[in-house]
Image (cartoon, grey):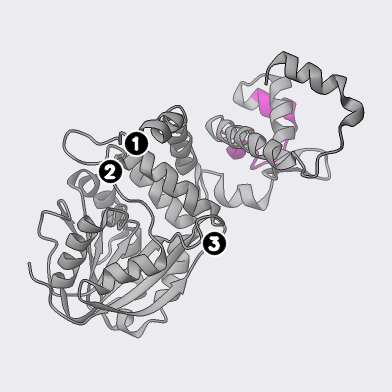
Amino acid sequence: MKPVEIADTVMNLNRLTVPKVDVGQIRNTAHAVEKFYILCSAIELEVFDDLRNPKNAMHLAEDLGLHQGMTQKLCAALVASDFLRMNHEGKYALTDLAKTFLVTSSPLYQGDHIKLMKKRREEMASKLSEAIKNGPSGMRTSSGDLGIFDQNFTISMAQYALGGCLQRTVEFLKTNDDFMKARRSLDLGGGHGLYSIAFSRLNPELEAVVFDLPSVIEGFTREMVSICDCNVKLLSGYMTKDDIGSDYDVVFVSEVLYDPKESINVILKKINNSLKEGGILISKHFHQDDIHEDLVAVFSDLMFSMVSGDRHGIYSTSELCHLIESNGFSVVRIEDIRSTSNPSRIIIAKKVSEQPE
């Protein structure tokens, strides 16, 4: 809008009416960015850890070596964001939300995931308009991996799983007879290994196998399995090229089937061939069934395309079911385990025919 246009609007104020729609949603969207960066700063500066014992802004600033005036303003913003509260002594204290997810000693700590989100958003924000104009360039490494799959990414995804979707998955699967009777399972692209560790605890007779890239398996995953001392085996390789094992009763695949259909068909055929007759595939993925309403799914799909370049993105439930059934499976159940932050559904499908290599 040019100055002359603004001036013309002002000069004709007597003809203006109050807008029929509220500009508040646009303002709130803009302020959501500020809220996210306020949260990131509080995590990076260890504010939540220091406030395990409530205190005023002056003592908080002294503890952490921060500017007192800016610390006061940060705390006020964190109260407005529901991460802090004022207690009866007038000191800043943690809300239940902060105690559960933002203190490093909490088993459900999400700080590393939030730090990675900040890093990825800063990397992609400057490229989004260019990608929409010219198409995504992707972020692949020379080896063909997605460059994001490093140690920090694996830890971040482990924290993300512990934020609720791991627990919801386990709660659902404990009611599934085929899963509870299984003696050998594969977690394809299993990354951090937390699902297989949880499965081996849920079903003590189960030998769980995690398959992922060598750089993932030989880092965080091996360390985690060693610490947990569980019946989990490790395999490394590239799922579209290397042997993923055989004689599985269950193959669990989570947040992997976002490739173009041609690549997914290759993966599903390998899964089918690795299963025993009558074995089951358990798919847990984001589903994009209403592209205009599910904000998490549609935003994830857009940003995923920024990272992955030529990969497809998030499928609808019907599209993914069709792909699964086209590769020798019969879908027997679809379970909605969505939350406000995770648009995931579980598809359980039974192997009905062998697929050619």
Q: Is residue 70 above or below residue 332?
A: above
Q: Which residues are magenta?
A: 46-62
- Sequence-wise first label, 3 or 1: 1
Q: Which residue is mark 1?
A: 136
Residue 107 in view, yes or no: no
- Sequence-wise first label, 3 or 2: 2
Instruction: State left or right for residue 169 relative to residue 216.
Output: right
- The mark found on residue 339 in the picture is 3
Residue 278 in view, yes or no: yes
Few, some or many residues within 10 Å of mark 2 (<14, 14–19, 20+): some
Residue at 27% in and 49% down? 223
Q: Which residue is mark 2?
A: 310
Instruction: Write down the quadrant of residue 351 in the picture.
Output: bottom left
> Of all residues shown, which one is farthest toward the left?
357
Q: Amino acid at mark 2?
A: Asp
Q: Are marks 3 and 1 in contact (CB under 8 Å)?
A: no
Q: Amino acid at mark 3?
A: Ser
Residue 123 located within the stretch drawn in magenta: no
